[in-house]
Image: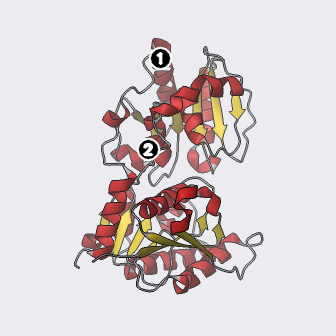
Amino acid sequence: MAVEGVNFIFHTIARAGGMERAVTDMICGFARKGLKVRGIAMRTDISVFPQELRDKIELVRVPARFPLCLFQRWANLDFENRAGAFCQKGWPVFSASRVTSPVDVAISGGSHWAHLQKKGRRPSFVDKKVIAHEREFYARAGVCVAHSQLTREEILELGVPAQKVVCLFPPVDVRKFNLGARENRERERAAWGVPADKCVLLFPSNNHSIKGADLILGALDAIDDPALLLAVASRRPIEHPRVLNLGFRTDVENCYAAADATILASRYEAFGLVAVESILCGTPALLSEYCGAKDALRAPGCFVFPRTPEGVKAAILSARERWRAGTLAVAEPQASIAYPYSLDRHIDALLELALNPPRN
């Protein structure tokens, strides 16, 4: 069955990291197939899309009934209850937000209950509401797409039938993330004020606690090597004598290419798309054992370490030795990525699932 367009629901279709960037990429992928896209969100910004695709993309902002500045999570819950009413009828519905209306494809980058477990936090009243939405979201979806095997297991533990849950590792826009970014490497490092005799670890983070900033800084202190620096790509700076604060970057591909390795010491990372992006830019990723991306990546582009002070330290020391030997950069990124990561193939798979969902 041919379709004219698709609906895509997510609370933020604007410039940000993580799932926000993945959603933007997927919307671009649908538009490049010649499909119209209605994007339904609380926050929208059409400028995140290439000019040549904007005539295919309509962004619909759901009016907020709770001020975001006062209570973000109540606003999210309200959005999830109402977003389905703004869909274009007759078009398949994809959602990466926990909406309570039926959708054709529920896209999950991780479950809220597992996130709480990894943080060791007991669910609050609002958390219980979020988890209730999560259960309804998966139950009413035609098919659930998990962005990692870890996330698939989390969804199954919520009682969703196994045949209804498909693991599709997330796509990457290779137009942006590729070895060509390394052409800007020296210029970018010069802008950072970093000479060639410094080994720079990149730490892209929107939550320093979850991403393991404390463990990484502790390892840097224990190694005590002035040649080792940590570049933090985040809106939240970190004060430390060996930290470079880059701020929030929209050209993160230049950051990957300028760094010598990317590191995440996460205690919970449903996937960790930054690892794939980094490898495609020729920079290896050091990942904790709790990053879902570890199932999709291999050496020499990816190294997995135990999430302990000793494990983080050993991973950094290993990367430093390869840097000294001149063998740290990834010359053939595709050899380290064990799944079809192209956006085009991912969109084809999503459309097939929407139009021909698994039979229960």
Quarter of the figure with the N terminus: bottom left
Question: For the residue marked with disc 1, what is the amino acid?
Answer: Glu
Is residue 254 visible in this depiction of the protein? yes
| Residue 354, image x, y percentages | 33, 73
- Image position, residue 308 (x, y; %): 50, 37
For residue 159, above or below residue 188: below
Residue at figure coordinates x 68%, y 80% from the top left: 63
Rendered location of residue 129, percent (x, y): 56, 79
Distance, label 2 to label 1, CA atoms, is 29 Å
Mark 2 or mark 1: which is in front?
2
Residue located beneath label 2 in the image? 174
Q: In which quarter of the image is residue 302?
A: top left
**Percent x, y for residue 12?**
60, 66
SS label for mark 1? helix
Q: Please rate how many residues cluster around mark 1, counting C-alpha atoms within 10 Å: few if below 14, some from 14 to 19, many from 20.
A: few
Question: What residue is drawn where x is 34% and y is 46%?
Answer: 295
Q: Which residue is outermost to the left?
A: 359
Q: Is residue 58 above or below residue 235?
A: below
| First reached walking from the N terminus: tag 2 or tag 1 | 2
Q: Which residue position holds label 1? A: 321
Q: Which of the image's four quarters has the C terminus?
A: bottom left
Left or right: 167 as drawn, with respect to 180: left
Task: Work out whether residue 75 or residue 288 is closer to the camera in this orientation and state it.
Answer: 75
Name the foreground residue: 351 vs 210. 351
